[in-house]
């Protein structure tokens, strides 16, 4: 990754192998934010990202450097309306900023899908007397995400889960590059069903992800 946070081949190589341009973009921007996490500029950027969640991409110029700078478009935008890549990147970066708030270490873990992160959260919150026959609050919220019929509805429920991950006693990490890929796919015709199945498999450990990567700067 260069000094401006633009991802390079070496710093964005996922433990899962090849990643998409959108995933590499998000991974690179988060790596840059983590490297400069103590700077006032980065702290301000993260705060603006949190406030931008629920708003359209491009509304706040203070986050353009991590949401609009050199976006890897599949096709050149044909209008001034936000395009799927912008929605996916903007939402993933804003959710990361929400998750990162008040944390002493990174919450971005390469290779950890959204379904697995939810599983880890549910496991972390389970009490000694909890019954496996009961549907946990985490699972109920997850069900709301995967049954959402619109992108905006899914993001509203994801926001609640990310807030719970932030408040967990033990770190719950999530690959925000992979999440951006999922959010991009969710917007395509028929893509929502594919994403739901992917998250379901991750949640039930059919798609086992590697152990959490301790930092985003680790090179593979």
Image (cartoon, helix red, strand yellow):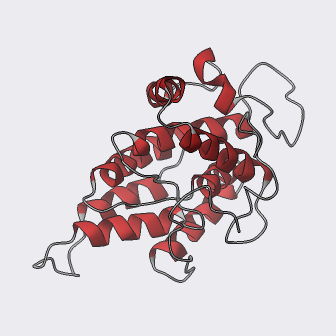
The quarter of the image holding the C terminus is bottom right
Q: Residue extending furthest left?
A: 129
Left or right side of 167 for 192: right
Nearest to the observer: residue 73 or residue 14: 14
User: Measured along the vertical axis of the image, is residue 117 above or below residue 100?
Assistant: below
Q: Residue 4 appears at what percent x and percent y?
A: 73, 33
Q: Is residue 162 visible?
A: yes
Nearest to the observer: residue 62 or residue 163: 62
| Residue 178: quarter of image | bottom right
The total number of labels drawn is: 0
For the point 70% across and 57% down, which residue is it?
Answer: 190
For the point 58% across and 70% down, which residue is it?
Answer: 197
Left or right side of 183 for 122: left
Q: Residue 21 appears at what percent x and percent y?
A: 79, 50
Left or right side of 81 for 124: left
Q: Residue 131 appears at what percent x and percent y?
A: 17, 80
Nearest to the observer: residue 217 or residue 96: 217
Nearest to the observer: residue 142 or residue 173: 173
Q: Is residue 147 visible?
A: no
For the point 62% across and 49% down, which residue is it?
Answer: 183
For the point 34% across and 49% down, which residue is it?
Answer: 166
Q: Residue 217 appears at what percent x and percent y?
A: 62, 55
| Residue 74: quarter of image | top right
Left or right side of 208 for 74: right
């Amino acid at each position: 990754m260069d000094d401006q946070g633009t991802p390079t081949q070496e710093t964005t190589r996922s433990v899962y192998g090849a990643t998409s341009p959108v995933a590499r973009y998000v991974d690179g921007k988060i790596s840059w934010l983590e490297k400069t996490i103590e700077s006032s500029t980065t702290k301000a950027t993260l705060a603006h990202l949190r406030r931008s969640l629920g708003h359209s991409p491009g509304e706040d110029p203070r986050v353009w450097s991590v949401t609009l700078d050199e976006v890897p478009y599949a096709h050149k935008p044909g209008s001034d309306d936000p395009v799927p890549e912008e929605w996916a990147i903007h939402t993933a970066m804003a959710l990361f900023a929400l998750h990162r708030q008040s944390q002493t270490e990174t919450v971005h873990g390469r290779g950890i899908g959204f379904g697995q992160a939810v599983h880890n959260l549910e496991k972390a919150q389970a009490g000694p007397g909890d019954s496996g026959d009961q549907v946990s609050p985490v699972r109920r919220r997850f069900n709301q995400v995967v049954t959402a019929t619109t992108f905006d509805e899914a993001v509203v429920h994801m926001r609640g889960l990310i807030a719970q991950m932030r408040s967990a006693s033990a770190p719950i990490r999530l690959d925000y590059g992979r999440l951006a890929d999922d959010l991009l796919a969710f917007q395509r015709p028929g893509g929502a069903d594919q994403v739901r199945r992917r998250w379901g498999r991750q949640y039930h450990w059919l798609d086992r992800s590697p152990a959490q990567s301790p930092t985003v700067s680790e090179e593979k």
